[in-house]
Image (cartoon, grey):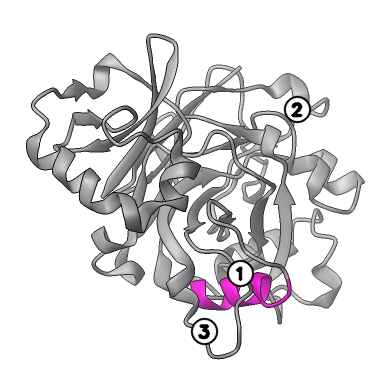
Amino acid sequence: MKLITFSRNGTSRVGVFSGPDDIIDLSDACAIADMNDLIDRYDALQPAIRKCIAETKTRLKLSEVKVLAPIPNVRRNVWCVGKNYYDHAQEFSSSGFDSSASRGAVPSHPIIFSKPPSSVSGPGDAIDTALDPYDSVDYEAELAIVIGKPGRVKADDDPWSFVFGITLINDVTAREVQKIHSQWLLGKGPDGYCPMGPTLVTMDDIQNFDALKLECYVNGEVRQSTLLKDLIFDIPTLIRTIGQSISLQPGDIIATGTPAGVGLGFSPPKYLKKGDTVSVVMEPVGSLDNVVI
């Protein structure tokens, strides 16, 4: 299923796509409070959702609604992974901004950090450069995994069984803040610096995970492009790394890392400027577009 959170007439709703631009509102028909509620009760709700798709005559057009982040009210910090593509690990390690560079360009174990809930924003929301006093705002296109079941990941568990679906994240970063503090939270945590969306696609709609292509465009120029098979640490490894000692929760989000081509990697750096439009793109999730102010 391709799910969406949207606003109509000032009210947040949960919907499912029944066509490329057709949305069925599930909030009233299935008594769903929000996307977290849907994820919590997904197994029980599936028959009702499929009945709505088959029987509901009223469709909303995508152009009639404001698309929000799929999970606008995340329950806790977004988990993030640093240096998880070989080309970006080299790019970042040689930049002078990497506080872990002394341990080598390619990490031996996943590097985990987080972004606070207040950093989450939606498609079309503005990325505010005023929150970075050094004018060093950068983009990072990332696939995000959404967790669907609770608990710690035991040795005999299949980590994929914890995955509900996928979405996209732009791990927006204030590079100079990241550098001067020698850690990543402050540079990556400003308000609105975690655009998410536009949709949440359940795993039963994903045919060949490794063949999915992740791309980033700035003003129509391709800056990043990779296949998911190029991750250093694959999805099961990331889930096991986090979940072996920290209990996962439904609705948890794991952003899996960014490939080469970030603004920092150019000489001189190509940081985001006021008036830019940055797009994180991957089918079947769609295009996550945000303006820079």
114 and 245: which one is in front? 245
Front label number (1 vs 3): 1
Whether label 3 touches label 2, CB < 8 Å: no
Question: What kind of residue is marked 3?
Answer: Asp
**Which percent across, then down, holds residue 26?**
29, 33
Question: Is 237 placed above or below 87 here?
Answer: below
Q: Give the labeled residue for mark 1.
A: 151
**Which percent across, then down, holds residue 156?**
54, 90
The label shown at residue 135 is 2
Residue at figure coordinates x 20%, y 21% from the top left: 61
- Measured Cα–Cα span from mark 3 to mark 2: 45 Å
Q: Secondary structure at mark 1?
A: loop
- Measured Cα–Cα span from mark 1 to mark 2: 41 Å
Front label number (1 vs 2): 1
Q: Within 10 angstroms of label 1, few (less than 14), some, or many (20 or more) residues?
A: some
Q: Give the labeled residue for mark 3.
A: 157
Q: Secondary structure at mark 3?
A: loop
Task: Tell me if 25 is positioned left or right of 219 in this view.
Answer: left
Q: Earlier in the sequence, mark 3 or mark 2?
A: 2
Question: Is 76 placed above or below 22 here?
Answer: below
103 and 242: which one is in front? 242
Whether label 1 touches label 3, CB < 8 Å: no
- Measured Cα–Cα span from mark 1 to mark 3: 11 Å
Q: What secondary structure characterizes most of the magenta part?
A: helix
| Magenta-colored span | 235-245
Question: What kind of residue is marked 2?
Answer: Asp
